[in-house]
Image (cartoon, rainbow, N blue to C red):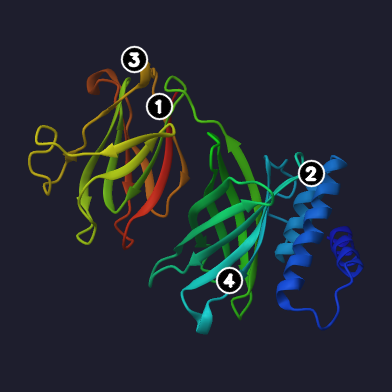
């Protein structure tokens, strides 16, 4: 703790901030300092120090925050600015930092507060890299932990326009009594899998929904839909490809009934995912619960089913999961 605090204090003092500096300038200077410190730590090969610097910036104890873990592709650091009059939407500003490449993507977004009696809120924003035409977007959720209301975890996906790679953010946030706070975490790039490697599904859910994966198909079952949700086609992505959920007379004669199946999406070029030995499921983002409720076996035609439970939340939200063979 001592070396990180000393390092940050020295760097902030060296930035030459005066007592008349605006809050925006202070926040930008602190992000500059943190970025520089992380770059130097990574250049020296001291990844634990890079993580300690981030948690020192965040204002949370280092112990228990994976300070010794080797970071992934890069870091996320930002500030939380409360909404006017304590409104439900706080502003999120910050950076996506890639120390190896030296890339800096500016973040501008919002953190929508959880609804009453809920612990998860929505995170959404856009990113932009100076001098580059392609922008990006991030979307996910944040939560409180252990009954605390001033800190918690944040998960999100980050996509840059024109890139087939999705980055997954795992961060912590902390706010003071006035709602002003900070965010810090890591992000990891993951290539879109081939069908043989796994089936990654991103879908907006409102209610109770099942995602089915067989050897060469994926489809969705609407088990129980939120009464306020809009009917019609919903855009979904399977391994990065568009999949519009449609409910035909053959697959779902009565749309409002339970167990309404979407028209299946076939695997590309006849590819096969081998689920004969079983399957695992991984959750990337999602405010509600997700669980593998059917293991593939010979009796069910080697079909895996993941249940997504969004019943506790109002409106629709994005979920992303991946099913892989054992």
The numbered mark, 3 or 1, whose residue comes first in the sequence reads: 3
Question: Circle 3 sits on which residue?
Answer: 270
Identity of the residue drawn at 40% across and 47% down: 319
First of labels 1, 4 by sequence position: 4
Q: Is residue 300 above or below residue 182?
A: above
Q: Are marks 3 and 1 in contact (CB under 8 Å)?
A: no
Find the distance from the CA under tag 1 to the CA under tag 4: 37 Å
Rendering coords of residue 184 (x, y %): 66, 57
Task: Name the residue carrying label 2.
Answer: 47
Mark 2 vs mark 3, CA separation in Å: 43 Å
**Would residue 235 appear left or right of 76 to someone viewing this image?**
left
Whether tag 3 and tag 4 are in contact, CB under 8 A, the answer is: no
Q: Nearer the viewer, residue 39 or 69?
A: 39
* Mark 1–mark 2 distance (CA, rounded to whole Å): 34 Å
Front disc: 3 or 4: 3
Q: Which residue position holds label 1?
A: 279
Of the two numbered discs 3 and 4 on the same chain, state the one appearing first in sequence: 4
> CB atoms at circles 2 and 3 under 8 Å apart?
no
The mark that comes first in sequence, 2 or 3, is 2
Residue that numbered label 4 is attached to: 150
């Amino acid at each position: 703790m001592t070396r990180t605090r000393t390092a940050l204090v020295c760097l902030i003092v060296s930035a030459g901030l005066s007592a008349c500096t605006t809050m925006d300038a202070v926040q930008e200077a602190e992000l500059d300092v943190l970025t520089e410190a992380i770059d130097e730590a990574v250049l020296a090969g001291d990844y634990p120090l890079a993580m300690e610097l981030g948690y020192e910036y965040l204002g949370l104890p280092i112990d228990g925050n994976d300070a010794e873990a080797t970071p992934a592709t890069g870091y996320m650091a930002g500030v939380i600015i409360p909404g006017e009059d304590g409104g439900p939407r706080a502003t999120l500003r910050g950076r996506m930092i890639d120390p190896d490449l030296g890339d800096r993507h500016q973040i501008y977004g919002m953190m929508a507060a959880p609804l009453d009696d809920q612990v998860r809120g929505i995170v959404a924003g856009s990113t932009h890299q100076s001098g580059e035409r392609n922008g990006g977007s991030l979307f996910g959720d944040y939560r409180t932990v252990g009954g605390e209301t001033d800190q918690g975890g944040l998960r999100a996906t980050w996509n840059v326009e024109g890139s087939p790679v999705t980055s997954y953010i795992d961060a912590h946030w902390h706010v003071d009594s006035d709602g002003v706070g900070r965010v810090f975490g890591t992000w990891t790039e993951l290539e879109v899998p081939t069908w043989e490697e796994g089936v990654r599904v991103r879908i907006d859910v409102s209610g109770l929904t099942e995602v089915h994966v067989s050897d060469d198909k994926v489809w969705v079952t609407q088990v129980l839909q939120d009464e306020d949700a809009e009917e019609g086609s919903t855009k979904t992505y399977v391994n990065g490809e568009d999949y519009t959920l449609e409910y035909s007379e053959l697959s779902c004669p009565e749309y409002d009934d339970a167990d309404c199946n979407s028209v299946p999406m076939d695997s590309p070029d006849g590819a096969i995912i081998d689920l004969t030995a079983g399957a695992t499921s991984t959750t990337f983002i999602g405010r509600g619960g997700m669980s593998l409720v059917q293991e593939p076996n010979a009796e069910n035609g080697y079909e895996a089913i993941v249940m997504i439970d969004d019943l506790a939340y109002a409106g629709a939200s994005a979920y992303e999961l991946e099913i892989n063979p054992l």
